[in-house]
Image (cartoon, helix red, strand yellow):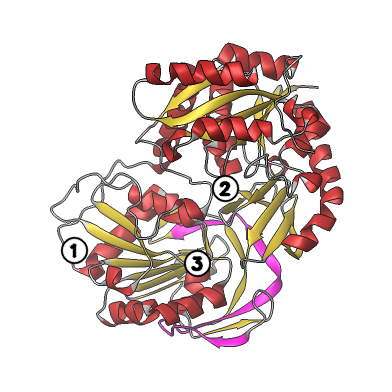
Amino acid sequence: MSGALLVAGTTSDAGKSVLVAGLCRWLARSGVRVAPFKAQNMSNNSMVTPDGGEIGRAQALQAAACGIEPSVRFNPVLLKPGSDRSSQVVVLGRPVGVTTALSYRARKSELMETVLATLADLRSDYEVVVCEGAGSPTEINLRASDIANMGLARAANLPVLVVGDIDRGGVFAHLFGTLALLDPADQALISGFVINKFRGDPALLEPGLRQLHSLTGRDVLGVVPWSEDLWLDAEDSLSYAADGVVGRPAPPVGTQWLRVAVVRLPRISNATDVEALACEPGVSVRFVTEPSRLADADLIVLPGSKSTVDDLGWLRRTGLADAVMAHARRGLPVVGICGGFQMLGTGIDDRVESGAGAVEALGLLDVDVEFAAEKVLTRPQGTVFGEPAVGYEIHHGRVTRCEHEGLVALPDGSTEGVVDGAILGTHWHGLLENDDARRAILRWAAEWSGRDGFKPASDTSFATARATQLDILGDLVENHLDTTAIRRLIDNGPPTPLPFIPPGAP
């Protein structure tokens, strides 16, 4: 059996996903055959794998860090929230139903069997498996049915690193409290700490690091500095600030900027689609949540949604729908992606996701959509404005009527999506990651918005930008973590004995 390690976090967004990606990159660059694993993920940012299933996008990024193709084995259970109380459950890449938080608990014993079997399978194929926890391991109200944190660590005897985000404040209390609330058997697996997003001189932390070791018997195995260059592939849509700029916009190649407003829907999915735009010099991408933010936009993007009909209602209640339609009436460009594309049409018949039945959409495209029970999960290829492109589709909605020219020319002679003057719609996620196709779409948007001075850069490579970010993560691990100690944990498991810290869970 191969070595393995679990990275847990004191909170959501403490840095688990990026630390796992960094560990994977470091190991892969060292010649180790390594794979990522997240037993249970809750995210509407997902993608389709070559083996035809759906996984969290963070695990796809971690697979890229390993230099391997993404697989459903890397994320056997994916929860996609459709409301505050219910989520679609995806098991080994396929949706198996909708569950509430309470009803989901009853399914966890069955899902744990799937999780452990999948992890064992991965460990037989790879030298190292780096596992990522979910949320915090000290959610004591959920511990009895946990399959992603200490429940997984206990079942597979995994050493656990706990990462805390010092940028939030209170990191020592977070780390100590996380350990102290666990029961003795769980505490025995907590093998070290990592502090993330530190700004300043690490020497200032030394007294605290020594005291934390004295109190817990565990070492801090690294202090990862804050990096302004890390922003691609956020784990979850909640990581995107409302009314916030995406990325680090570089000055334009031409004489004008192209201003892109992305409507941050309440149930936004695959928000990462617009990150490729933010890699382009002269393209300013901002998430917006209220109508005034659309007033000076050159291009509006309606992104994907896990709850298309509900989010369409939110657009109308907030006045954003009127603002989008006013923008379109001025002849300015609008792009709809997946759920956003469906919103741009004439009508949506949804008896699957929301159960609302026939709903009037925005009417900017003469397109009808009907939701089917079976989800479309594909990785198609074609050409957009004459440029080659690949993407992936994750949706229940099917176009049943379309009175427009297609956007994507497919190999079989059919088309996908729509382009009608200044309105463009597609079910393809990842379309904008294709460099030549993205540049063609930007030229289209600049023409319709009257931005004659905007010119797409000729050398922007989204794949290179992502690889650069992964290498930054690998460098952070290699330069700032005790990799010798981490490799020892991977190979030998938790050190013994480790002291118990009271009070512990009863």
Look at discs 2 and 1 and give the one toward the viewer: 2
Secondary-structure class at tag 2:
helix
Look at discs 1 and 3 and give the one toward the viewer: 3
Q: Residues within 10 Å of mark 1 (few under 14, many from 20)?
A: some
| Amino acid type for the residue under numbered disc 1 | Arg
Horizontal relation, residue 11 to residue 297: left or right? right
Instruction: Decide whether the magenta segment is chiefly helix, strand or loop.
Output: strand
Q: CA distance from mark 2 to mark 3?
A: 19 Å
User: Image quarter for residue 127?
Assistant: top right
Q: CA distance from mark 2 to mark 1?
A: 33 Å
Considering depth in this image, is 456 or 127 the residue closer to the camera? 127
Q: Residues within 10 Å of mark 2 (few under 14, many from 20)?
A: many
- Find disc 1 in the rendering and name its residue: 451
Circle count: 3
Secondary-structure class at tag 3:
loop
Asked if the residue at tag 3 contacts the one at tag 2, i.e. Cβ–Cβ closer than 8 Å, the answer is no
Question: Is residue 22 in view from this perspective?
Answer: yes
* Residue 14 magenta: no
Horizontal relation, residue 51 to residue 280: left or right? right
| Of callouts 2 and 1, the N-terminal one | 2
Which x, y percent locates residue 387?
A: 40, 55
| Of callouts 2 and 3, the N-terminal one | 2
| Of callouts 1 and 3, the N-terminal one | 3
Q: Which residues are magenta?
A: 357-383
| Amino acid type for the residue under numbered disc 3 | Pro
* Quadrant that contains the N terminus: top right
Furthest toward the left, the residue is 255
Considering depth in this image, is 257 or 38 the residue closer to the camera? 38
- Find disc 3 in the rendering and name its residue: 266
